[in-house]
Image (tube, rainbow, N blue to C red):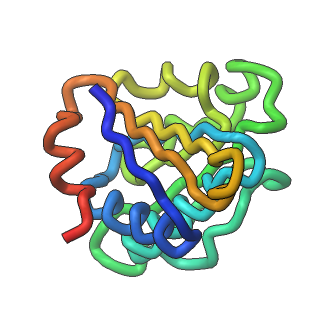
Amino acid sequence: MSVEFEIATPEAMRELGERLSGILRAGDLVVLNGALGAGKTTLAQGIGRGLGVRGAVTSPTFVIARVHPSLTEGPGLLHADAYRLEGRLEVDDLDLDALLDESVTLVEWGHGLVEGLSPDRLEIDIIRAVGLDGDVRHVRISPHGTRWDAAQLADLLTPR
């Protein structure tokens, strides 16, 4: 069961990320999927803001992975981008699993490449609307594994 949202602005996407950060903990894997410009990094910025991590959360496309240590008592953020990776062997070379237990691991473009890191993960698909409401994003959060419950996710992520 998935949870779905419509997000109208970049700030609303960051706010969704910030709400999501409230339920994330060290060891969690989040896989972000969507076309270029869909809002993956914008969502990651909200997660980083909510986790209280050091450094600006920007697209790691050219560095492939960035570690953002926590400035609070919470977990840090390992933000990776698999866009330029050729396959699972290159993902293994990144040693993402080395920091998995102590950080929230967020991988953009990770579908089909990083699922082996954890059976418990959130897959987030961001789809940019076509037409007059071109700024609207449709966000679908799909929980996998025993760590997540879709009904609880919906309740926790719904703005109050």
Q: Which picture quadrant has residue 147?
A: top left
The image shows residue 136, relative to residue 101, as above or below, that is below
Residue at figure coordinates x 69%, y 67% from the top left = 58
Q: Which quarter of the rendering shows the C terminus?
A: bottom left
Q: Judge by depth and name the residue closer to the eye, 129 or 145.
A: 129
Instruction: State the image quarter where residue 34 is shown.
Output: top right
Most extreme residue toward the front, as rendered? 132
Could you tell me how many numbered marks the image carries? 0
**Quick check: 140 left or right of 80?**
left
Vertical side of 155 occupied by 45: above or below = below
x, y percent for residue 40: 61, 53
Residue 66 visible to an observer of this rendering: no
* 110 to the left or right of 24: right
Residue 149 image offset from top left, x and y in percent = 18, 34
Q: Residue at x 58, y 70 (%)?
A: 10
Is 16 placed above or below 103 here? below
Residue 23 appears in the rendering:
yes
Left or right of residue 125: residue 36: right
Quadrant position of the N terminus in the picture: top left
Residue 52: give x, y in percent of width and height. 40, 76
Q: In the image, what residue occupies the spot 39% across and 49% down?
A: 5
Task: Where is residue 83? Give x, y as percent.
Answer: 77, 38
45 or 67: nearer the viewer:
45
Q: Is residue 42 above or below residue 148?
A: below
